[in-house]
Image: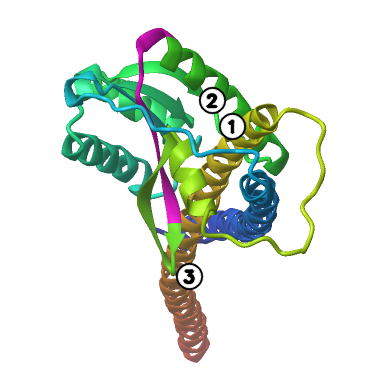
Amino acid sequence: MDIEGLQKRIKTTQDLRSIVSTMKSLSAVSIIQYDTALKSLIEYGRTINLGAVALMKNGALELPKEPRVKPESRRVLAVLIGSDTGLVGKMNREVVRFAQKSLTEKGFQINQTGFIAVGRQIIGQLMRNQWNIVESYPISNSVKAVSKTAASVLVTAEEYMRTNHITHVYVYYSEKRGVSVSPTSTLLMPLGTEWLERLKKMGWPGRNFPTYTLPPQTIYSALLKERLLIELSTAITEALSAEHHMRLTTMQAAEKNIDENLEAMNLEYQQMRQENITTELLDVVSGAEALRMQKRK
């Protein structure tokens, strides 16, 4: 490669580094946004929990009896949440593998399982596996769009449960664990009995309970729907935060690799430039020596 070709390669690599740096900065900002959204969801969840606690402590709500389901009658719907774009390493593949392993261990048959895919990369994974995709949704990078996506998934899940006698709905997604990202899962439905059992241990922060005019069961149904929406919104937000964490890690590695290549190319450029200067000097000296010899003749 000549020096001009090397200069063009250095310029292209510098442009690439600028793009990588921008993507890294965007991911870092996005992580902060999603982590802030997660804190808000946790606070809202506490408010919903207190509403249910008030009903129970006030004696207006009894724990519903969880219906007994025979093992052979258990049917499952799985919601898999991934990313819309790439540059996230093995994150999407790991979610799919984890879901397959988890469902199999729980005694469910993959070929008899319905799947709701959230994120284009997950959709591609499920299609390659030829799994039964009930519905699919893109995953927006907007924090405001999370609840809308969660609400749409819930409507689809509830409808599929009614028409296909589904007994369990699990959600599989990625979450940050320290400096790494790992797949995890949560039971979305049935939530009622398990949720209320946890709330029984909670205390009421005040002396008096709030008053209400609607029937307790109506309030409980509304609280349960909000709790389901919070659970799914949290999973989607966790997945988005994990996605950008993976992309940030990928961009940091790419940036380091680019810097090393730039350093090597700049060193090569300096060497080639020095060689060219040396060659030019030798030509000048040789020319001057030739002129001096001609004058002597």
Query: Does residue 181 appear to the left or right of 96 in the view shown?
Result: right
Is residue 179 magenta-colored? no
**Residue hosting label 1:** 150
> Where residue 234 appears, x then y in whole percent?
56, 46
Q: Which mark is residue 167?
A: none
**Residue hosting label 2:** 153
> Where residue 54 appears, x then y in whole percent?
68, 49
Residues 151 and 224: in front is: 224
Q: CA distance from mark 3 to mark 2?
A: 43 Å
Q: Amino acid at mark 3?
A: Asp
Pointers 3 and 2 in contact (C-beta within 8 Å): no
**Residue hosting label 3:** 259
Q: Amino acid at mark 1?
A: Ala
Quadrant of image for the N terminus: bottom left
Please tell me how crowded label 2 is: few (under 14), some (14-19), or many (20+) other residues with Cα within 10 Å: many
Pointers 1 and 2 in contact (C-beta within 8 Å): yes
Q: Which residues are magenta?
A: 163-175
Q: Amino acid at mark 2?
A: Val
Pointers 3 and 1 in contact (C-beta within 8 Å): no
SS type, badge 1: helix
Is residue 81 in sight in this rendering? Answer: no
